[in-house]
């Protein structure tokens, strides 16, 4: 800088009048800088757009619920979906499908903390056979996401079948909006979970200290952003609202291995029981109720099922359901 | 004419700079880079020797640094001119301003002296048991800057650039797919944040900017590693020879290290073999050769510059005073109350062994390891600390121990690491939701990675309602901090980890 031209100790520099042209230039440039920075700030950090939730497709299968039992989780999934009427009933040609497994924990598949990778692989295969354009797989894990995707075996199994497995970006969220009063109002939900043609929810049946069991409704927490710990307060109502918002078309509960204690993270092979079952249903409530019966616990003690039955959200009575059982 | 040797040098400098950044860039989960994360630190004799002396051990990496010393005896201070990534940055900064090497008055002043003082102080401290190489070692300064400041800034900038474009123009198709592949391949899945990375950047910036005042000022005057190499290079075999010099003094005024003096004598310890003088020589009579100058009769004047007796005594007096002061002080600060990485050494040994390279913080998958500023005293600046609010210690992860170049964090197997205790969690019943407000919350319990659950739930009936209230089973807790990280209570978490009962090695 030329110090001779610009001298702070020279008082005249402050007494110099500013010309009109210069003043206008200053104001315009200042304002436009402010506006631009504000614009960019909003583009990057601003509030997401608001969504009303996925539309109900109301596709029904041949049965209300199919229970498959056997030794091979891949074949069990294929046979159960075929009994339901085939994947082409749920997945249209050229559509985008979201398969949402539970990839919550940094555990190997044997520990039964994450969904069985063979079940996910079978679903991806069937979606592509039915003519899906794209199968997206994601979750918001509790542990470090790279480790969870890797060690659960789901990333490898699904990518081999051609699905795109990716991480949820916290800037790519939309705000949930409900027609009724809901504690989940304005909760950030991952955009790709809503902007899809078919949503397949693939939870694993396991123990949970608050809800008793982690089931399909609880698994949908994996598309939420924000301070997720807050969902645990008044969890029943929040989960039912969330399920109503996401509207999964198909619920596949992996009960091949069952983590009976110390859930949801587990970590001890002694707590894992092989019950070698798989539940497929279109109604998430029915799937959850049946899974409770499978695990031998009272469905009404699970807060979200109690809430769903009191609101008559879905069918929470097994006796009224049309159930088909197959052995693979 | 083609300045072939200068081109070689520049290529070598750029290659090593890129290699250095690549190694640090790949120091992240799953740690599958081509070279181990501590490659450059193992090649650094200052860190290896000083840490070995101050800890009274022999670090296994010292073999590589001895290799560097042998190379230096053969070639001279080639490391500074051809390899050092900080030297390359300084050269790039110095090339912005032309003609600043010709400060003729400075050449004859003994500005090369301070670096020997720095080296002397560092050495004396290490003999009394303090490792202070971290404060001015060039490799460490550069690594800290790249790991904790440059890479986070670049990844954040690129990420935000894509976010603006995708969000603004609604490009959720191909551009979003490209963004996702970019993130999983090069950019890294997470964007990391490091506290006081601005100060780390300023530290680097001052050193690099000093090149605008005088080319390679840092290397000539302050760098202790340069001083160590200079001492060794005085015995170097490769030497500069001028056949029948016409004494035009062009090489002297252009020398960036001031190695060529007014009487055209040449200080081998100062020369970094930048090869400028070979091409500055109008008669092309300057060469670097291994042959004995007495045989080729080049009429060379070697200069011998060293420390005067007065300076030496001054140095010893000053540094032993400092050392005594630190010895007195550090007795009282063994427990600064911060959570150290898993399996780190006992606090005085940890401070001594840690060279503040930032590898553990760069590699930490949850971003939980952060540089401390003054929380553990002056001698603890930029040592790692686990901040559970930012990230917890991943139960199945051993990365920080695997990248530590000096073993300040012990390298343990996964089985051993899972049993290492970082501290103990405590539930603050005055803010915890189930305790203070009778609300449902079991977040800490469900995240606890111990298979038997170190956080257990107590069923209590309050007003006809059963509430599950968490409490910590101290014997099981390893203090990983995931409960503190996931606790939904803000701003101060209701379950917190304190570093008491920590396993230190």
Image (spheres, rainbow, N blue to C red):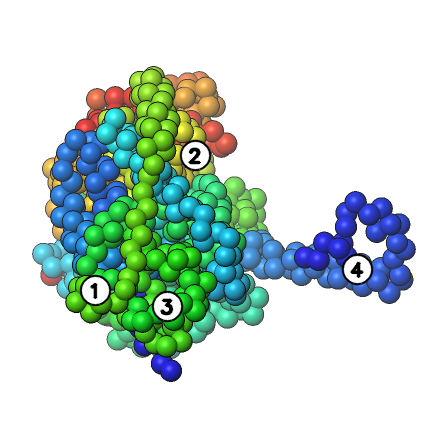
Residue B254 image offset from top left, x and y in percent: 44, 64
Rendering quarter of residue A279: bottom left
Residue B133 image offset from top left, x and y in percent: 31, 39
Q: Distance from label 1 to label 4 (Cα)?
A: 69 Å
Q: Which residue is mark 3?
A: B277
Instruction: Name the residue nearer the viewer: B253 or B85.
Output: B253
Question: Which chain's residue wears label 2?
Answer: B
Q: Is residue A263 left or right of residue A269?
A: right
Sequence-wise first label, 3 or 2: 3
> In the structure shown, which secondary structural element does the residue marked by tag 2 occupy?
loop
Label disc, if present, on residue B293 of the rendered structure: 1
Sequence-wise first label, 3 or 1: 3
Residue occupying the point 16% across, 49% down: B66
**Disc 3 and disc 1 on one polypeptide chain:** yes
Q: Is residue B45 left or right of residue A145?
A: left
> In the structure shown, which secondary structural element does the residue marked by tag 4 occupy?
helix
Q: Is residue A297 left or right of residue B21?
A: left
Q: Which residue is mark 4?
A: A26
Question: Which chain's residue wears label 3?
Answer: B
**For the residues carrying marks 3 and 1, which lies nearer the camera in this image?**
1
């Amino acid at each position: 800088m030329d110090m001779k031209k610009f001298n702070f100790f020279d008082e005249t520099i402050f007494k110099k009048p500013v010309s009109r042209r210069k003043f206008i230039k200053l104001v315009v440039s200042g304002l436009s800088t402010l506006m631009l920075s504000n614009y960019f700030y909003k583009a990057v950090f601003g509030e997401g757009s608001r969504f009303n939730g996925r539309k109900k497709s109301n596709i029904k299968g041949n049965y209300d619920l199919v229970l498959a039992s056997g030794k091979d989780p891949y074949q069990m999934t294929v046979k159960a979906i075929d009994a339901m009427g085939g994947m082409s009933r749920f997945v249209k040609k050229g559509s985008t499908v979201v398969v949402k497994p539970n990839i919550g924990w940094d555990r190997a598949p044997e520990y039964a903390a994450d969904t069985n990778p063979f079940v996910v692989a079978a679903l991806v295969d069937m979606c592509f056979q039915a003519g899906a354009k794209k199968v997206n797989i994601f979750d918001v894990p509790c542990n470090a996401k790279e480790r969870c995707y890797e060690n659960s075996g789901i990333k490898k199994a699904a990518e081999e079948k051609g699905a795109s497995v990716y991480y949820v970006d916290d800037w790519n969220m939309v705000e949930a909006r409900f027609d009724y009063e809901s504690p989940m109002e304005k909760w950030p939900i991952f955009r790709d979970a809503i902007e899809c043609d078919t949503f397949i929810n693939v939870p694993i049946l396991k123990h949970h200290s608050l809800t008793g069991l982690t089931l399909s409704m609880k698994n949908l927490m994996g598309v939420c952003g924000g301070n997720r710990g807050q969902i645990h307060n008044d969890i029943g109502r929040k989960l039912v609202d969330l399920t109503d918002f996401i509207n999964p078309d198909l619920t596949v509960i992996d009960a091949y291995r069952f983590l009976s204690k110390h859930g949801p993270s587990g970590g001890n092979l002694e707590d894992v029981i092989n019950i070698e079952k798989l539940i497929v249903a279109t109604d998430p409530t029915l799937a959850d109720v049946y899974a409770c019966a499978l695990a031998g616990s009272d469905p009404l003690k699970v807060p979200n099922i109690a809430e769903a039955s009191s609101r008559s959200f879905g069918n929470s009575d097994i006796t009224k359901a049309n159930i088909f059982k197959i052995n693979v | 004419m083609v300045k072939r040797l200068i081109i070689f040098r520049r290529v070598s400098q750029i290659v090593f700079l890129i290699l250095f950044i690549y190694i640090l860039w790949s120091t992240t989960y799953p740690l599958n880079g081509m070279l181990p994360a501590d490659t450059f630190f193992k090649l650094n004799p200052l860190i290896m020797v000083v840490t070995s002396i101050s800890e009274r051990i022999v670090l296994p990496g010292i073999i590589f640094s001895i290799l560097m010393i042998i190379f230096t005896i053969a070639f001279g201070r080639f490391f500074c001119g051809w390899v050092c990534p900080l030297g390359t940055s300084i050269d790039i900064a110095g090339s912005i301003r032309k003609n600043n090497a010709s400060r003729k008055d400075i050449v004859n002043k003994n500005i090369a002296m301070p670096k020997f003082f720095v080296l002397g102080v560092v050495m004396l401290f290490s003999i009394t048991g303090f490792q202070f190489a971290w404060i001015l070692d060039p490799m460490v300064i550069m690594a800290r800057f790249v790991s904790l400041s440059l890479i986070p800034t670049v990844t954040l900038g690129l990420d935000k650039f894509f976010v603006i474009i995708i969000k603004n123009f609604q490009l959720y198709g191909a551009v979003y797919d490209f963004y996702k592949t970019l993130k999983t391949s090069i950019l890294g899945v997470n964007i990391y944040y490091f506290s006081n990375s601005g100060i780390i950047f300023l530290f680097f910036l001052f050193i690099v900017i000093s090149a605008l005042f005088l080319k390679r000022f840092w290397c000539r005057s302050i760098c202790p590693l340069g001083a160590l190499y200079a001492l060794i290079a005085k015995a170097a075999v490769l030497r500069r020879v001028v056949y029948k010099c016409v004494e035009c003094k062009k090489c002297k005024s252009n020398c960036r290290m001031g190695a060529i003096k007014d009487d055209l004598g040449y200080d081998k310890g100062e020369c970094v073999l930048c090869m400028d003088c070979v091409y500055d020589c109008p008669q092309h009579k300057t060469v670097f050769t291994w042959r004995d100058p007495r045989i080729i009769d080049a009429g060379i004047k070697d200069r011998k510059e060293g420390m005067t007796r007065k300076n030496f005594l001054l140095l010893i007096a000053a540094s032993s005073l400092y050392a005594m002061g630190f010895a007195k002080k550090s007795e009282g600060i063994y427990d600064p109350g911060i959570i150290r990485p898993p399996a780190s050494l006992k606090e005085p040994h940890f401070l001594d062994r840690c060279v503040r390279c930032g590898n553990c913080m760069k590699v930490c998958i949850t971003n939980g390891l952060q540089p401390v500023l003054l929380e553990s005293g002056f001698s603890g600046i930029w040592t790692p600390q686990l901040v559970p609010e930012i990230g917890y210690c991943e139960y199945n992860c051993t990365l920080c121990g695997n990248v530590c170049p000096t073993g300040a964090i012990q390298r343990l197997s996964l089985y051993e690491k899972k049993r290492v205790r970082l501290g103990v969690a405590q539930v603050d019943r005055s803010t915890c939701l189930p305790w203070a407000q009778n609300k449902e919350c079991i977040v800490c319990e469900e995240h606890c990675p111990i298979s038997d659950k170190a956080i257990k739930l107590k069923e209590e009936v309050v007003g006809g309602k059963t509430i599950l209230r968490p409490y910590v089973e101290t014997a099981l807790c390893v203090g990983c901090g995931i409960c503190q990280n996931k606790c939904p209570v803000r701003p101060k978490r209701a379950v917190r980890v304190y570093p008491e009962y920590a396993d230190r090695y």
